[in-house]
Amino acid sequence: MVFFSFKRRSHFVYKKLRDPRSKIRLLYLHAGRADEPICCSLRTPSLGSLPQYEAVSYTWGDSTAHHPIQINGKQFDTLRNVYYALKELRHPVGIAILWIDAICIDQQNLEEKRHQILLMGDIYQRASRVIVWLAEPRADLDLAVGLLNELKAQHDEGTYTVRSLLAIHRPRLRSPEWIALRNLLDHPWWSRIWTLQEVVLARNIVVRLGQHVVPWEHLGIMATSSVLASQTLEMLTMRAGEKLHSDRGVPQGCYAIGLIEGMRYRIRNGVPYSLVTLLGESWDRKAADPRDHIFGLSALAPDIKELDLYPNYTTPVGKAFTDTVHKILLRYGTYILFSHAGRGYDR
């Protein structure tokens, strides 16, 4: 095993992509043990010649907290959440090939960023699988995963009704395993605008919870099973004295899973979305940059190019929104967006 030191290393500088409309960067994450530095390299294949890779869906978290990694032999300061994701996702032997936006896109190059955002649909669709990485692993993850496995087994048996489900789980309502599941479904990942297209377009999804790899289907049954969906919603509702990340009083994941499953079903059946429909369905999702409420849906809305709404982070926020509404009015002749204005706020 080769050990690396970050002392006196020069900082990594991005090389411009020859054509950011057809080429991407892939991160080659080298093997290492938990106590070893993270060492990577970047390669720039075209979309037509991609190796097998995995795409990571996660939340950026605190953008001011950085940790050093090594890229192409040089130091690169990356986000705290990215750093810990790479620590968990690297293999003890062999190379993991990943696409992760904070590193694979030069975030300071707005022109590159504009073109790469338009490729994200292809990037997530072509990945061998999308890994949903939920930051901040906790001691109760084992309990949450155990309960998910139990619910999936009961679902597959097909033997329960509302009455039997309540008989099994109602007495355990505030048990550690149900609290652990509520905490999992209350993670900020479930509320972010970008994560929507990342999993809706994926061929294969797994959720990484510490050392656990959970198939998406174990979570999806909360939406596809009407019995489980209704009872889970009731059982996870916030009680007096409890706090949740979501302001709905119910973990955001309870709603997000249903939304994601519905969108995946629609797209699999060849029913395209319009931007105006997507804006209505995703109005309550969150983004650090308000413009991402539009740009973060670009991979799901085929008409975004027809509307000439290309991602442009030099456009002031107010103008980005007014231009979007104006173009939707001209194209579709609908005032439906005005019914969403101020939803969730004092109108």
Image (cartoon, grey):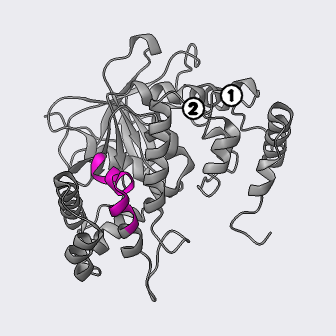
Q: Which residue is mark 1?
A: 303
Where does residue 170 sit, x and y in percent of width and height?
Answer: 27, 79
Question: Can the viewer see residue 255 in this picture?
Answer: yes
Is 248 situated left or right of 328 in this image? left
Is 121 situated left or right of 304 in this image? left
Is 189 situated left or right of 315 in this image? left
Q: CA distance from mark 2 to mark 1?
A: 10 Å
**For the point 20% across and 35% down, which residue is it?**
31
Where does residue 144 sit, x and y in percent of width and height?
Answer: 25, 64
Three-letter amino acid code of the residue under disc 2: Ala
Q: Find the residue positioned furthest to the bottom.
A: 240
Magenta: main secondary structure: helix
**Which numbered disc covers residue 299?**
2
Magenta residues span 217-230
Q: Quadrant of the C terminus?
A: bottom right
In the rendered image, the vertical position of residue 72 relative to residue 264, given as above or below: above
